[in-house]
Image (spheres, rainbow, N blue to C red):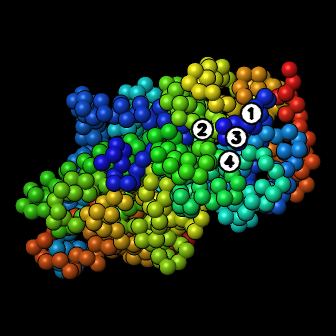
Amino acid sequence: MSKIGKAFEGRKAFIGFLTAGDPSLEKTEEYILAMEQAGADLIEIGIPFSDPIAEGIVIQEANIRALKNGVNAEQIFHMVERLRKKTEIPLVFLTYMNPIYHYGYAEFFERAKQAGLDGVIIPDLPFEEKSELKADAERNDIDLISLIAPTSQKRIEMIASEATGFLYVVSSLGVTGMRSEIKTDLSSILTAIRRVTDLPAAVGFGINTPEQAAAIGAEADGVIVGSAIVKIIEKYGNEAAKPVYEYVKRMKDALTQK
Amino acid sequence: MQKGRFGEYGGQYIPETLMNEVIRLEEYYENCKNDPEFMQELDTLLREYAGRPSLLYYAGKMTEQLGGAKVYLKREDLNHTGSHKINNVLGQVLLAKKMGKTRVIAETGAGQHGVATATAAALLGMECEIFMGKEDTDRQALNVYRMELLGAKVHPVTSGTQTLKDAVNETMREWVSRVDDTLYVLGSVMGPHPFPTIVRDFQSVISREARKQILEKEGKLPAAVFACVGGGSNAMGMFYNFIGDESVRLIGCEAAGRGVDTAFHAATMAKGEKGIFHGMKSYFCQDGFGQIAPVYSISAGLDYPGIGPEHAYLREIGRAEYYPVTDDEAVEAFEYLARTEGIICAIESAHAAAYARKIVPQLPKDENVIICLSGRGDKDVAAIARYRGRDIHE
């Protein structure tokens, strides 16, 4: 089992997302550690991209702020190296194909391994195009996280059978962002996944309240929260460590309640 | 060649949410393409509604002045809605209807594709929403109102650079949100498979007609065909049926804005690098970290940081050539065509005319060339006036 799998062992995992470099890489590092202290089990680090087509407005704006700060993949690898001296929490990148392509697949995944990264999520890389970089990811023990959408239907089996790390179940149609209600029939998606794999399945997109975390956590192996955390960082800027800690703690508590 | 690929270019780099839908689109398209009834219906619309075939006009004065090969203009500007875009949207909206969709969405730059989509949607009874960069809604205000007249809702896009690329981003985001009843009617030979193929096939009517027309008029094939390229749909349409005719040079003219050595251009072929964006592997203007670069052109329709994957392939195998044309050269050609032939063409098309003006004098008089006039220029008149220092607003 990869390190990512262990994040789900014996517990419901809370996965927190933030955009690297918003408001600065030093703060991103600090907020990741704050999330870990608050009980987060895995951290998703967004490498900012100029055109994040899967993101709603909150994370789009975080991308713009980070890019304005001149943040790039190399600096983020350095941040991961610094973090690895302080924590063993599983870390995954979320980024789009072009920055990885531009870096070079082999170079990117070698660098990721060297820095101590555990996985990569690429929203614009569907199952059919995975062969593009699968070998490079595997050779460097980086889990390529597969996404499953409400529209995946018969594709679930195909995707889940080749997945690594965990399965990222997209809760709703559309882009990332807080939603008051999640209408997708997650149970049947989770059942279909579990028929083909033992890998944990975490649900993301739209989750922002403790009630949602508790309800979804009752069925899924974990929840992924992005926009709500990014929103707190947007609001508090350099002073977000405490509110991020408190929010993550509240969410994790709701998730662990029996 | 691998399905959905042109050499290594193309592919389907899109969110999982859309995968079943593009697979379904491909299936429907394959069926419709081979369905005589569908093709008959489309053909009737193209003839009776869009006004096809478009004229192949012999530009006698231009030929005389340039002193080289005979110049023919393929008059896509005379189509209903004023550009080649109608060829593609009639096909795609008809396809959307066959798929049981009730709503179409589209991006637009200059507004030509938006107007064409809104038109086809009005005609075929579909709900229609258009995404257009805020900057473009300002510089093409008349087209915004035109789309509204046609019953479409126009969303100004305020994210990113507020131009065509951001309009594509926003239309993709909208499609992911409402994939059940909605088809994204893509305006160019770009995006994930099967769009580059679908759009090329629907636009290939341009060269199917032009090839026949030039053989009738001249008894020989052209030495070269010229078309402007942003995403590259009129160019693919103009090139496609000549690809097998090896003697015919296929020349794409891209927007060099204020010059390829400045930061203000949209010259993807001259200055871009390989990348993966908007669902496809192709060439893109980008920075040293793979961030998509802001692009600039006087022409809103060419103001796009990428190019369709089949163009990338045609260049790689040496079949097509691409050259940058500056704002200055395009504006000059715009004015030249108006003065010389009495034709006010789109500033996009003027890029093709500008480069043809350089090449034609070098070609022997017994040869001929075709320039694709992809659209008419009414929409650009105020902007050209301002470029020349006359403060005219629509």
Looking at the picture, which amino acid does disc 3 mark? Answer: Ile
Please provide percent x and percent y for residue B194. 38, 42
| C-beta proximity under 8 Å, tags 3 and 4 | yes
Q: In this image, B243 relative to A75: left or right?
A: left
Q: In this image, B93 relative to A49: left or right?
A: left
Please give the residue where the numbered disc 3 appears in the rendered image. Answer: A4
Q: Chain of mark 2?
A: A
Please give the residue where the numbered disc 4 appears in the rendered image. Answer: A118
Which SS class for mark 1?
A: loop
* Quadrant including the N terminus of chain A: top right
Q: Chain of mark 1?
A: A
Which SS class for mark 3?
A: helix
CA distance separating discs 3 and 4: 7 Å
Figure check: B346 above or below B52: below
Do marks 1 and 4 share a subunit?
A: yes
Instruction: Point out the tag, 2 or 3, that comes first from the N-terminus.
Output: 3
Looking at the picture, which amino acid does disc 2 mark? Answer: Thr
CA distance separating discs 2 and 3: 9 Å
Please give the residue where the numbered disc 1 appears in the rendered image. Answer: A8
At 21% from the left and 53% from the top, the residue drawn is B241
| C-beta proximity under 8 Å, tags 3 and 1 | yes
